[in-house]
Image (cartoon, rainbow, N blue to C red):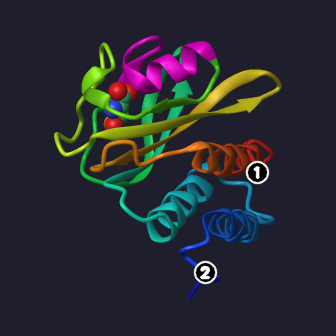
Amino acid sequence: MYDFTPADPNDKPALYRDLADAVAAITLGEPDAVANMANCAALMGEFLPDLNWAGFYRVIDGELVLGPFVGRPACIRIPFGKGVCGTAAAEARTMLVDDVHTFPGHIACDAASRSELVVPVLKDGAVIAVIDLDSPSPARFDEIDREGVETIARILAELF
Ligand code: SME
């Protein structure tokens, strides 16, 4: 059994340090990307409060395809440039959206989602996946979340 628990869930920078440590530990020596994404999605779902979806889309043949996640069933394929995920992939940059209802072309996989953070996973300068976090609360994500999830993306990029 793996039992990772954040030291102090109310200290957000510490929470992300503990999450990054847990992701590094559970993926250590494991080359299978699906297994690593699955455990990472589970850890994000356990560590990060107020989420209704946490997971991955992978870049396959020039589009995003649903990967391991925790949350409700989601749309399977997203073209580059479409929605928050497709925009993050096309522009190879993090998207932090306080209110998804105001984002042109937002793809509503779960009507409960109100804010969203999407971080590209970059390997040798190319986007190979995105990490997607959704919350039912508006403006759930801030710069600490952005930095924390970008750190996780860098850890995972080494494993793909
Ligand atoms: N809302 C995303 C689609 C993926 S789901 O949130 C899981 C988007 O607009 O890209």
Whether residue 131 is in magenta: the answer is no
Helix, strand or loop at mark 1: helix
Q: How would you classify the magenta stretch by its main secondary structure? A: helix
The answer to which of marks 2 and 1 sits earlier in the sequence is 2
Q: Residue furthest left?
A: 111
48 sits left or right of 32 in the view: left
Q: Nearer the viewer, mark 2 or mark 1?
A: 2
- Coordinates of residue 87 in the picture (x, y in percent): 48, 17
Mark 2 near mark 1, Cβ–Cβ under 8 Å? no
Residue segment shown in magenta: 77-91
- Coordinates of residue 43 in the picture (x, y in percent): 53, 67
**Type of the residue with mark 1:** Ile
Q: Residue at x 37, y 45 (%)?
A: 134
Q: Is residue 18 above or below residue 61?
A: below
Whether residue 81 is in magenta: the answer is yes
Q: Residue 7 appears in which quarter of the rendering?
A: bottom right
Q: Residue at x 56, y 88 (%)?
A: 1
Q: Is residue 148 above or below residue 10?
A: above
User: Which residue matches tag 2?
Assistant: 8
75 sits left or right of 34 in the view: left
* Numbered marks: total: 2
User: Which residue matches tag 1?
Assistant: 155
Report how far apart the C-alphas of labels 2 and 1 lie in the structure: 22 Å
Helix, strand or loop at mark 2: loop
Q: Residue at x 53, y 33 (%)?
A: 58
Towards the viewer: 80 or 32: 80
- Coordinates of residue 32 in the picture (x, y in percent): 66, 54
Q: Quick one: label 2, few (<14), some, or many (20+) residues within 10 Å?
A: few
Q: Residue 25 appears in which quarter of the rendering?
A: bottom right
Is any part of residue 157 visible from this angle?
yes
> What number is the disc on residue 80?
none
**Type of the residue with mark 2:** Asp
